[in-house]
Image: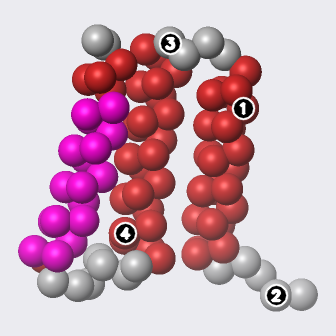
């Protein structure tokens, strides 16, 4: 039997996080805490995809910085908008 590699574990973790975010989003009222938690998990998922699936850990530093900045700015904007 073939053992799972590192990418398969990351893939399973991303699927589990997606399902838990769906359950939280559907099961609870939209509160600032739930919105913040989901935005932070979206940020984490984006960083995992950038580093492991897009393989930008070894890529051009500027390109990696731009992609990582995207996943810091937009979830942060979601969190800020949840307070209004």
The residue tagged 4 is 50
Disc number lying in front (1 or 2): 1
Which residue bears the numbered disc 3?
31
Q: Earlier in the sequence, mark 1 or mark 4?
A: 1
Q: How many marks?
A: 4
- Quick check: 14 left or right of 3? left
Residue 16 placement (x, y as % from top left): 69, 49
Q: Does label 2 or label 4 sit earlier along the sequence?
A: 2
Q: Which residues are magenta?
A: 62-78
Q: Main secondary structure of the magenta part?
A: helix
Colour logic: secondary structure
What residue do we see at 70% from left, 44% from top? Answer: 19
Question: Which element carries disc 3, helix, strand or loop?
Answer: loop
Which circle, 1 or 4, is nearer the viewer?
Answer: 1
> Which residue is denoted by mark 2 in the rendering?
2
Residue position marked by numbered label 1 in the rendering:
23
Q: Image quarter for residue 55?
A: bottom left
Residue sitting at x 43%, y 14%: 32
First in sequence: mark 2 vs mark 3:
2
How would you rate the neighbour count of disc 2 (Cα within 10 Å): few for under 14, some for 14-19, many for 20 or more?
Answer: few
Examine the structure image and report whether residue 55 is included in the region drawn in magenta: no
Query: How far apart are the alpha carbons under marks 2 and 3?
Result: 43 Å
């Amino acid at each position: 039997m073939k053992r799972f590699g590192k990418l398969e574990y990351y893939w399973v973790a991303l699927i589990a996080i997606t399902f838990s975010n769906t359950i939280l989003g559907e099961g609870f009222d939209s509160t600032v805490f739930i919105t913040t938690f989901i935005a932070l998990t979206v940020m984490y998922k984006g960083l995992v995809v950038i580093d492991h699936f897009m393989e930008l850990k070894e890529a051009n530093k500027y390109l990696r910085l731009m992609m990582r900045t995207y996943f810091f700015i937009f979830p942060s904007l979601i969190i800020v908008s949840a307070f209004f």
